[in-house]
Image (cartoon, rainbow, N blue to C red):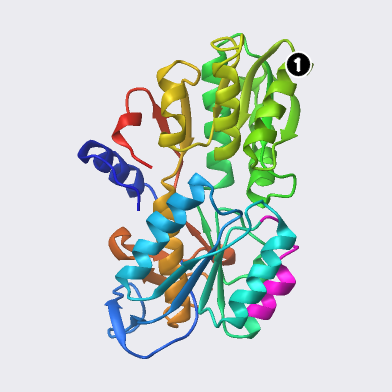
Amino acid sequence: MAATSRGGRAIALAVLAAFSLAVTGCAAQEEPATPQPGASGAAATIKEGLKIAFLPKQVNNPYFDASDNKGGKVAVAEFKGVYSQTGPSEASPSAQVSYINTLSQQGADAIVVSANDKDALCGALNEARQAGAKVVTYDSDTNPACRDAFINQASAEGIAASQIKLISEAVGPDGGEIAILSATANATNQNAWIEMMKTELAKPENAKLKLVATVYGDDDDQKSFQEAQGLLARYPDLKGIVSPTTVGVAAAARYLSGSEYKGKVRLTGLGTPNQMRAYVKDGTVGSFALWNPSELGYLAAYTGAALASGLITGKEGGTFTAGRLGEYTVGEDGVVLLGDPFVFTAENIDDFDF
C-alpha cells in the first residue's frame, strides 16, 4: 500500500477508525494461512495459493495503481496468494468484458473489478461465477445480482455531502454557479454521487449554489482538461467546479492553474495527494477529499480471499478479518463499507504519499 509518514499514518488510522465492514472470493488449495478470528469456526482460515485478479476501470491510472498494486498486491502477499492486475488502457465496458472472459478461462479464484458500467459486465461476470470465480466489485459497482460483494469506499451520501460542503466553503457565502466534471456517463459510482449531490444542493443551506452543467471527461486526462476549459467558455460566471474523479480533478486543476481563472474559480473533488499536492500549494485548490485507495484495494483482496475460502458468502451479517485492518461485517446487498471521505488541505497533504 501507499507509504505515509508517522503523522500521516496516525491521521490515516484515525480516519480508518471511522471505517467499518467488508467481504471476499473463490476456491483453491486446502493449506491454512492467515487466521481469521472474525469468521465462524475457530479454525477458519484463508486458503493459500488463491488467484486474485484485479480488473480496474483502466490500467496506468494513478488511482488504480495505488488501490491495486500498493494495496491489493500487499494483501495477497500476506495470505500467500497469487496476485495479478489486468485491464483496458481506456475506461470501456466492452473492453472489460474480454478481460473477464480471459480471467475466467485462466481459473481466477476471485475477480476484483471496478465496473465501467452497471449492467454491461453482468453476462461475463455471471459466467465467471458459474465457472467457479468469486466476484468482488470495488470503487464502482455492478448490479448486485452480478457479483458476490461490493467494497464501497464510502457511502454515496457521505461523498456527496462532503463534496457540496467543500465547494460551498470554497465559493463562499455568496454562492453562485457551479458545475460537475465527472468520469464516464455510465459510471455507477459517479452517477450515484451526482444524484446525491443534487439532493444536497436542494437543501436550504445550499440555496445559493446553482448547478448549471454536468460534463464528462471519460477519465481521460486530455478530454477532462478540455471539458474544464469548455465549462469556463460556456459559463463565464462560473464560481466553482466539483470533479469527483481523480483524473478529472487533476486535469481541471492543471487547466485552472495556468489560466486567468486561477484563484477566481474554485475547484474541489476526489483526488490523491500526490496528484494534487502542487495545486494545493500554489493555491489553485483549497481542499479536496478521498479515502485511501490502497486501503480499498487491500480490503477488496481480503474480501475476495474470504469468499473463495468459504469464510463468508456475501450475505448480510457475515464477518471476517482483513489483515491489519481488522474485522469487517458484510452489510445489506453484500456491501462492505470502507468509511467516510478524508479531507486533504495544505496543512495535512504532506503527511500522505499516495
Look at the numbered disc 1 and give the secondary structure of its residue: helix
The quarter of the displayed image where residue 125 is located: bottom right
Tell me residue 151's x, y (percent): 51, 59
Front residue of 340/331: it is 340
Q: Which residues are magenta?
A: 116-128
Other residues around mark 1 within 10 Å, as few (<14) / some (14–19) / many (≥20): few
The three-letter amino acid code for the residue at tag 1 is: Ala
Q: Is residue 324 above or below residue 228?
A: below
Q: Is residue 95 above or below residue 204?
A: below
Number of numbered labels in the structure image: 1
Q: Is residue 303 above or below residue 4?
A: below
Residue 121 magenta-highlighted: yes
The extreme left residue here reads 6
Tell me residue 50's x, y (percent): 42, 79
Let me know if residue 182 appears in the view.
Answer: yes
Residue at mark 1: 233
Tell me residue 287's x, y (percent): 46, 25
Horizontal relation, residue 314 to residue 69: left or right: right
The quarter of the displayed image where residue 235 is located: top right
Residue 160 magenta-highlighted: no
Horizontal relation, residue 50 to residue 226: left or right: left
